[in-house]
Image (cartoon, rainbow, N blue to C red):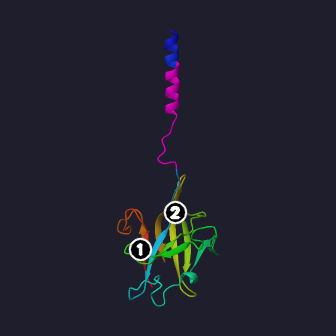
Amino acid sequence: MRQKIVKLTLLTIFITIFSSCEEKLCGCTVVDADVNLIVTDSENRNLLDPSTPEHFKEDDIRIYFLRNGQREEAYAANLDAPRYFRIDQSGPNGEYMMRLFPDLETHNSDITTTIIRWNGSDEDTVACEIRNTDNSTIITRVWYNDDLGYDQNDQRLSRYKRGPRLINVRK
């Protein structure tokens, strides 16, 4: 009889321990929050390529976040991309592109606005719909100068099922 009680107690403990566990997919945080831009002129020359005449110079480009109706210059010295962008030769065909890290702080809205000032007079606006969950931050839609350029649910706009949010910009 005593052996039955011990077995029943152990079985109860075992069932309690394993029934209280929750399965987690990865236990990690996912941040999928960049927008890739290839910028060309009317002659299809890449304006981010330093060998292109009159290209946009990385040192001249500024990023601003529009928060509560006010522009705030985006700069954080501790980041790998302190001005919230980088330009490199990582486009799908090896072309130069800008990887933009837009504003992710949603203030009373799921849409944030980031302004790119290419030089002293040329600016563009990038609006991003952000989806935040307990363990992820994901850009689901991108508007470039009010034109929808990326929608994760529209395969016509989402040229890559998995991969960069790539928008071709004509200047």
* Residue furthest bottom as drawn: 53
List x then y, in percent, for residue 72: 64, 74
- Give the number of the mark in front: 2 or 1: 1
* Mark 2, secondary structure of its residue: strand
**Residue 85: quadrant of the picture:** bottom right
In magenta stretch: residue 121: no
Please tell me which of labels 2 and 1 falls first in the chain: 1
- Position of residue 22 relative to residue 14, above or below, is below
User: Horizontal placement of 162 versus 127: left or right?
Assistant: left
* Residue furthest left as drawn: 156
Mark 1 neighbour class, 10 Å CA radius: few under 14, some 14 to 19, many 20 or more: some
In the image, 63 versus 4, the foreground residue is 4
In the image, 85 versus 108, the foreground residue is 85
Q: Name the residue under label 2.
A: 130
Magenta region, residue range: 9-27
- Position of residue 109 relative to residue 20, above or below, is below
Q: Mark 1 points at which residue?
A: 91
